[in-house]
Image (cartoon, rainbow, N blue to C red):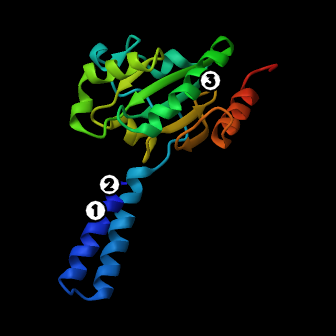
Amino acid sequence: SHYYFSTFILVKAMIKRSINAKLVFYISIIFFIWTIPLYSQPNSLPEFTASSSDAWINSAPLRKSDLKGKIVLIEVWTSIWINCIRSFPWVHGIANKYKGVGLEVIGVHSPEFSYEKKRAQVEKVAKKYHKTIPIMMDNDYAYWKALGNRYWPSFYLFNQNGQLVLRLFGETHPGSQNAIQFEKAIQKLIPNY
């Protein structure tokens, strides 16, 4: 999203300076193509990019190997977006409903603003909204990039072999289309459900 905004600003600046419209068009296409590799989607669960205990809340640092054989839901969120906050109840419900049958929910906090990089800020939000799931602080956007993510909130579902099954974006509530789609996908992965 930052890149599309940058493209918009670039095009607007060029038009104001009366640069040839064809030139503006070609530069925009080149810029768009240049950003595509930044958003390639993974086929499998990326390795967690934070290994310091300071970067993890509600958990010791996790590794991909710690989740082998489990269904994994990755929730990418930021502490100030209302769409993320409004999705917390659904995430809590899913985590509680399927925890006993092999689902692990991991929160990845990728901040939009610099003040959100402070652990105290993330802990404050986690406490306020009763987020007890493991949370990895992704202050350098390394995991965001590994996922090829573009939005807050985003949800990625990986099967027991670490393969991507489903990814959805946007505010999600119990009973919403996103929620129904995710529950069906989770249930298909649970043996004898």
Marks 3 and 1: which is nearer the front? 3
Q: From what the image shows, is residue 151 above or below residue 125?
A: below
Return the residue nearer the eye: 168 or 64.
168
Q: Are marks 1 and 2 in contact (CB under 8 Å)?
A: yes
Percent position of residue 101, x then y: 69, 14
Percent position of residue 21, x then y: 31, 87
Q: From what the image shows, is residue 152 above or below residue 123?
A: below
Residue ranking furthest to the right: 192
Q: Is residue 18 left or right of residue 57?
A: left
Q: Which residue is mark 3?
A: 94
Q: Which residue is mark 2?
A: 2
Q: From what the image shows, is residue 132 above or below residue 188?
A: above
Return the residue nearer the eye: 20 or 120.
120
Residue 45 visible? The answer is no
Instruction: Please name the amino acid that badge 2 sits on.
Output: His
Figure quadrant of the C terminus:
top right
Residue 179, located in which quarter of the rendered image? top right
For the residues labelled 2 and 3, the Cα–Cα distance comes to 31 Å
